[in-house]
Each structure stands twice: as structure tokens, then as C-alpha cells.
Image: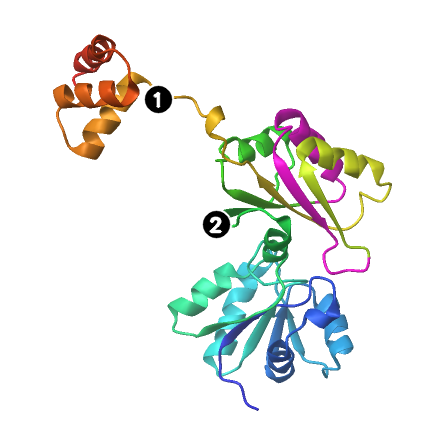
Amino acid sequence: MILEAKLYLVGTPIGNIGEISERARVILSEVDVIAAEDTRNTGVLLKLLGIAHKKFISYHKLNELKRQEILLDMLKSGQSIALVSDSGMPCISDPGFLLVAAASQVGIDVVAVSGASAVINAVAVSGFPAEPFLFIGFLPRKESEILRAFSGFRENIALVFYESPKRILKTAALLAFHYPEMKICLCNDMTKLFERTYRGTAIQVLAELEDNPKAEKGEYTGVAYVEFTPELKAPLSLEAMLVDTMIRQQISLKEAISVVAQDSGLPKKEVYRAALGLKRLEL
């Protein structure tokens, strides 16, 4: 089989070797060059898969700009290249998107070869609605920046993140203090022998972690979720109700006064006073 000169983004196992797809195995066997985040790790993977030694080129976050032109020249000369990270899909919190953008700009086809993804696995097992979800990658190290990452967190959106095992207890304690009722699903060592999932409120998850003497081992992918509860929503002010009614029904302020008074059951004089406030703002 002779592969075309394309850039193949090959998903590799995040733990269990059985996750490798047959298509990924074939691509890794047939490409001319493998650009690997860590050539040693990828070499071990190929050995486990029974794939003969390939030509490697190191491609990671510290050298991706230097390697980019070399890889583009290879592609232009007719060579096929597989890009792999240490685990999961390339470009997802791993180097690669710069190369993909550059290859696309010069007319080189980029093909994704599906594989395991810690993000998708965690969302799937979380039990939270996944439409929509937001992936923010590795959490920052500073507490203030972690809180900032969660501060704009809206209800009914699953927030997916990575965290180091050495910081997981500190991060869990921070979330439990500031967001005690936030629902969290923490996936540890997914697909591996000692895979474990922690579920519950931030406080409950922290307690589970503290009870596990081996909590600070293995990588973590977390999913946080705040469920919409109407009773916790602050009611709209009369001014906001008037503006909303005017916009939605395309009516005048005078007409909106009658509509809001009728819908809310409030005295028309009270709604009228709110309307006078809007007039003063020249709305």
C-alpha cells in the first residue's frame, strides 16, 4: 500500500493498547515518516503493535516551529507523514495545530485518523448533558487563575479540564471551598488497570480523593457541571421586563406597560413608575 503525500493525525491509545484502530495501525505501518511528541514512547508503541521501525522526527511544543518547515518540505516532496502525540488525538492540548494550519495553507491534505480521546471519554462517562461542553485544557497553576477559569462558567454547560495528579487535591479543595455544590466527575487513569471515577458535588469528590492514599497518581480529566435551577435565578427587574417585552413584541413603551402589568399581576402604576425610569435613560 502506497500512501498519498498527506499529513495524517493519528489517534493513539490513552492507556489500553487495545484502543488502537486497525486504520491507525495501517497508517503507522505505511507512512514514510512519523512525527512524534516523544520518539521513545512512540517507538515502544510501534514495538507493541508489531510495526517495523519507522523514520522518526521529534515534534513537540519546544521545537514545533523549527520542525514545521522540515515537515512541510517532506510533504511537498511527496512523502506521507503521521503526526502522533504521546496519547490520544494530536492537537488536543498537544502540539500540532500550527503544522495543520501551515499544511492546509499550502494545499496539503490533512486527514484525521480517529482514536481515543480523554476529553470525549470523560464527557461520555460523566453523566452530564454534553450539549454544549467547553474544553479548557490544563488548568493554570495559580489559584486566582483557576478561579478565573471557572468564574465565567455558565449553567447547563459541561466544563472539561485536565489536571496534574500532584495538584489534584489542592485544586479539588479550591473548588470545594468556592463552588461546594458544583457537580464534578473526575476520571483518573482512564482505560488503564486501576482506572477510577470520582462523582458527586465538589465537596463529595474532595472527600473521596482525601480517602484514597493513591489519589496523587495517574492523570486526571475532569468534567464540572452546574445545573440550571429556576429558583436560584434572580427575577428580572420591571425595567428589564419592559425592555424585553418591547423588543420581543416590537411594541412601544406605552403598550409594553399594559402587557407587563397584565402578565406580572402588578399594579399598573408600579409598572408605569419603572417606565418613567427608562424614559429618563432615553430608551
Q: Which image quadrant: the C terminus?
A: top left
> Tag 1, which secondary structure?
loop
Q: Residue 165 placed where, x, y %?
A: 75, 44
Q: Are marks 1 and 2 in contact (CB under 8 Å)?
A: no
Q: Nearer the viewer, residue 68 or 202?
A: 202
Q: Is 170 part of what is drawn in magenta? A: yes
The residue under the point 66% across, 44% down is 185
Q: Is residue 188 left or right of residue 223?
A: right
Q: How many marks?
A: 2
Residue at screen point 39% across, 71% down: 106
Instruction: Measure the alpha-carbon separation of dots 1 and 2.
Output: 26 Å
In the picture, measured across the screen, residue 125 lies left or right of residue 263, that is right
Q: Which residues are magenta?
A: 164-193
Q: Nearer the viewer, residue 166 or 152?
A: 152
Q: Quadrant of residue 55?
A: bottom right
Residue named by callout 2? 131
Identify the residue position indicated by label 1 in the image: 236
Mark seen at residue 31: none
Q: Secondary structure at mark 2?
A: loop
Q: Residues within 10 Å of mark 1 (few under 14, many from 20)?
A: few
Q: Earlier in the sequence, mark 1 or mark 2?
A: 2
Q: As shown in the figure, which amino acid type bears the numbered disc 2?
A: Glu
Residue 167 appearing in the image: no
Q: Position of residue 143 (x, y in %)?
A: 64, 30
In the rendered view, would you say 152 is above or below 185? above
Count residues near mark 2 (Cα–Cα under 10 Å), then give few for <14, some for 14-19, many for 20+: few
**Place of residue 275 in the rendered image (x, y in percent of width and height, measured from the top left):** 20, 14
- Residue 61 lies, with reference to residue 49, above or below; the image says above
Q: What kind of residue is marked 1?
A: Leu
